[in-house]
Image: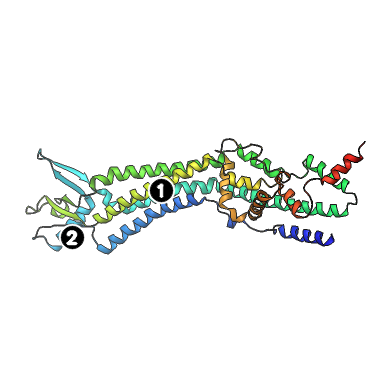
Amino acid sequence: MSLAHTAAEYMLSDALLPDRRGPRLKGLRLELPLDRMAKFVAVGFPLMLMSLAFAQEFSSGSPISCFSPGNFSVRQAAYVDSSCWDSLVHHELEESGQYKTRSLWPHKALPYSLLALAVIMYLPALLWQYVAVPGLSSDLLFIISELDKSYNRSIRLVQHMLKTRQRSSDPHIFWDELEKARKERYFEFPLLERYLECKQRSHSLVATHLLRNSLLLLFTAVAYLYLGHFHLGIFFQEEFSCSIKSGLLVEEAHVPEFINCRLTSLSIFQIVSVSSVAIYTLLVPVIIYNLTRLCRWDKGLLSIYEMLPAFDLLSRKMLGCPINDLNVILLFLRANISELISFSWLSVLCVLKDTTSEKHNIDTVVDFMTLLAGLEPAKPKHLTHRERDESP
């Protein structure tokens, strides 16, 4: 019997989680994977296109090429290119004989508009970083620590039960004390559950998360409006008529009033416009899916931790509307599952619990580890029958 108890003690000692002290904030993921991906795409893609636009401008020289008259000097031709790029106005002759002007400034503002788009798209992430992350990090550190500690307390409790059973000469006394402790809920550690109940009534995190994704959708709609209003009308216009009667040429009688110019950077402009629409169109379903995740509970994670004493949010049907801070915290616990050492142990115990033949006697990790340690989770039948026979 002593060999069996020694083996049980070793098994329980191995089941204890290592004590992880020291700074753990560095390893926490304080952004959900989809949020991080949306941020990198929404911010990084305009910056990449901006570098492409600047690279094309520096490599090919002037972004326009004007067809100056043959009698123009080199200085006059350079002035025409510079003047037409500065004004960037197309003069179109209408049927009435008057000229209608249309500005082509989006070509000139292309790199800077992409930079402004990247800055605007970064604002929701900045909001999350300064409003939600400080409180979220402390919540996650406390909850992760308490989940692992609750598991360790359960294992230490089984160790204590095993030693008490060894020292007890009368098995009746041991089982009576054990049943009394279970009936009076001595094995439960309700601090964590009470804390999670408070988070279920809080809405600051979920409001910030909803605001972040809603702002992303709003800024995406603004980007669509900008592209549709300013880029669509000049998307295919490669040549434009430029007025050159200004500056050095204002008093030149032989100089025509208008000359044709060609936009050499039109292909880059078209690539930026089309790719921006395509990327942000693909990003919208991701943002919407990220919002819909708040409409359902992660019951898979909760069911695993139902094995801990006093963690019965599911069995007691305490989960109401999922749009609250608790649901956001559960999403981040799932994202930081590598920090939860107890999760892998409890997952294994849940699988073993489902395959054991005595499911009605196993509710928590205490019950299951009691069974693995060689103690029955309930009073043995022969002791129960003996009590009945001895009672008058």
Q: Residues within 10 Å of mark 1 (few under 14, many from 20)?
A: some
Tell me the kind of residue under disc 2.
Answer: Ala
The disc label shown at residue 78, or none = 2
Taking depth in this image into account, of 175 and 107 the one nearest to the observer is 175
Q: Position of residue 65 (x, y in %)?
A: 18, 58
Please tell me which of labels 1 and 2 falls first in the chain. Answer: 2
Q: Secondary structure at mark 1?
A: helix
Residue type at mark 1? Answer: Leu
Quadrant hosting residue 203: top right
User: In 3D space, how far apart are the residues under numbered discs 1 and 2 (Cα atoms)?
Assistant: 44 Å
Q: Nearer the viewer, residue 237 or 106?
A: 237
Q: Residue at x 88, y 54 (%)?
A: 167
Labelled pair 1, 2 in contact (Cβ < 8 Å): no
On the rendered structure, is 11 left or right of 262? Answer: right
Q: Quadrant of residue 232?
A: top left
Q: Which residue lies at the image location 59% right of the left edge and 42% below the top edge?
A: 326
Q: Callout 2: helix, strand or loop?
A: helix
- Taking the view exactly as shown, the residue that stands out farthest to the left is 254
- Comparing labels 1 and 2, the label whose residue is closer to the camera: 1
Which residue is disc 1 drawn over? 283
**Label 2, residues with CA under 10 Å away: few <14, some 14-19, many ≥20:** some
Residue 304 in view: yes
Left or right: where does residue 223 sit relative to residue 368?
left
Question: What residue do we see at 29% from left, 62% from top?
Answer: 58
- The answer to whether 209 appears left or right of 304 in the picture is left
Residue 156: x, y in percent?
Answer: 76, 53
How many numbered dots are placed on residues in this image? 2
Percent from the top left, x then y, of residue 42?
41, 50
Label disc, if present, on residue 14 of the rendered structure: none
The quarter of the image holding the C terminus is: top right
